Image: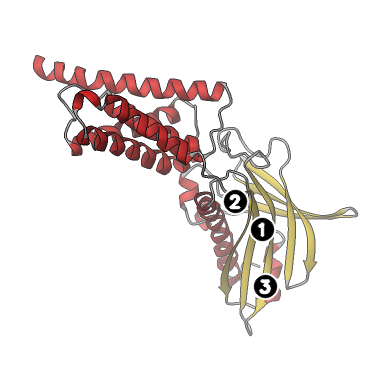
């Protein structure tokens, strides 16, 4: 029993030290405003961290290739979870950052192990650390321009356009079971609860509410009866409850914005193809990876709304 406890202590101690060190470096980065949303941070920093994690693995343990990989993945995952439960990051940010951070950490570890195996043990320490640093310099040169994304999804509804169109203006009393639970909801985004259409002398606005924590405005810019509704999004002060929106991906912030949206209706001879489109802006410089997440979130949002409209129309809700 004593021997087991001793082995556990010698394994956990470096693990705790490494996790604490990585979190401390992250806190320092936040304090000095290091660019967190970038390939340099999301991939480059983990490359160096991967080499450091393996360099300080327990003496006499985790030295085989398979055990080394398990060690590095375990430390990286534990660090991510620690940042989540400590409140340093939110669920959405941790989820989006997990893949590049884990891949970068693994890459740094593989570079370290490869150099250590190719060279004499006593002479390879410096080169095994320098190589990941050079890899970071290479990664830091990767940057993509800012992009606008237009994301569209369609659904066919067994009703004529006039019937479908009547459902799009006011959407009251949405019950939770009417919205299929999707991955975005697992990440803490609430389900829509109602939308209210208001016309006035100065214009038309639809007020959308998602749970008790999200409310925003859709300022109508185009209206063609039974054919089209377009709008610009407005997000007033306090539009989202604290804890839902992540500090690094705030709507209207440095890296991300939601610009406009709209419905398009196409007559299919007694049926309707309803298309919901959202235009977003991305300045993260993460290119295809950022594009994936824009589509991930907004396609889930779109399908939830489109299915709700279809089900209500076909059930004769009106």
Q: Quadrant of the rendered structure where residue 65 is?
A: top left
Q: Secondary structure at mark 1?
A: loop
Which circle marks residue 171 in the picture? 1
Q: Nearer the viewer, residue 129 or 6?
A: 129
Whether residue 1 is visible here, answered yes or no, is no
Q: Closer to the observer: label 2 or label 3? A: 3
* Distance from the alpha carbon under mark 1 to that under mark 2: 10 Å
Residue 61: image location, x then y, percent? 16, 26
Q: Nearer the viewer, residue 161 or 297?
A: 297
Q: Residue at x 44, y 36 (%)?
A: 136
Left or right of 267: which side holds 20?
left
Tell me the crowding category of disc 1: few under 14, some 14 to 19, or many 20 or more residues within 10 angstroms, Cα based.
many
Q: Is residue 2 above or below residue 260?
A: above
- What residue is shown with label 3? 265
Q: Closer to the observer: label 1 or label 3? A: 3
Q: Quadrant of the rendered structure where residue 3 is?
A: top left
* Distance from the alpha carbon under mark 1 to that under mark 3: 17 Å
Query: Quadrant location of the N terminus?
Result: top left
Residues marked 1 and 2 touching at CB (< 8 Å): yes
Q: Secondary structure at mark 3?
A: strand
Q: Residue at x 69, y 62 (%)?
A: 262
Q: Earlier in the sequence, mark 1 or mark 3?
A: 1
Left or right of 167: which side holds 47?
left
Q: Is residue 198 above or below residue 313?
A: above
Q: Nearer the viewer, residue 56 or 185?
A: 56
């Amino acid at each position: 029993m004593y021997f087991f406890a001793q082995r556990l202590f010698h394994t956990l101690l470096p693990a705790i030290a490494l996790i604490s060190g990585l979190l401390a470096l992250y806190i320092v980065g936040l304090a000095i405003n290091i660019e967190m949303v970038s390939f340099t941070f999301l991939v480059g920093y983990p490359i160096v961290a991967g080499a450091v994690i393996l360099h300080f693995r327990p003496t006499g343990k985790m030295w085989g290739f398979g055990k080394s990989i398990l060690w590095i993945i375990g430390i990286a995952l534990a660090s991510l979870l620690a940042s989540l439960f400590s409140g340093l990051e939110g669920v959405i940010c941790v989820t989006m950052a997990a893949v590049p951070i884990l891949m970068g950490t693994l890459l740094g570890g593989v570079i370290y192990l490869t150099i250590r195996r190719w060279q004499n043990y006593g002479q390879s320490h410096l080169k095994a650390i320098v190589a990941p640093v050079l890899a970071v310099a290479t990664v830091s040169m990767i940057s993509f321009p800012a992009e606008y994304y237009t994301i569209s999804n369609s659904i066919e509804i067994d009703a004529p356009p006039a019937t479908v169109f009547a459902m799009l203006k006011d959407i009251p009393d949405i019950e939770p079971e009417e919205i299929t639970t999707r991955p975005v909801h697992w990440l803490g985004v609430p389900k829509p609860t109602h939308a209210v259409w208001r016309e006035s002398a100065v214009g038309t606005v639809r007020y959308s509410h998602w749970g008790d924590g999200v409310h925003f405005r859709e300022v109508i810019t185009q209206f063609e009866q039974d054919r089209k509704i377009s709008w610009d999004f407005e997000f007033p002060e306090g539009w989202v409850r604290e804890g839902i929106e992540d500090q690094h991906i705030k709507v209207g912030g440095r890296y991300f914005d939601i610009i406009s949206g709209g419905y398009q209706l196409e007559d299919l001879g007694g049926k309707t193809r309803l298309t919901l489109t959202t235009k977003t802006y991305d300045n993260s410089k993460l290119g295809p990876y950022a594009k994936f997440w824009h589509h991930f979130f907004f396609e889930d949002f779109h399908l939830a709304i489109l299915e709700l409209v279809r089900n209500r129309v076909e059930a004769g809700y009106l």
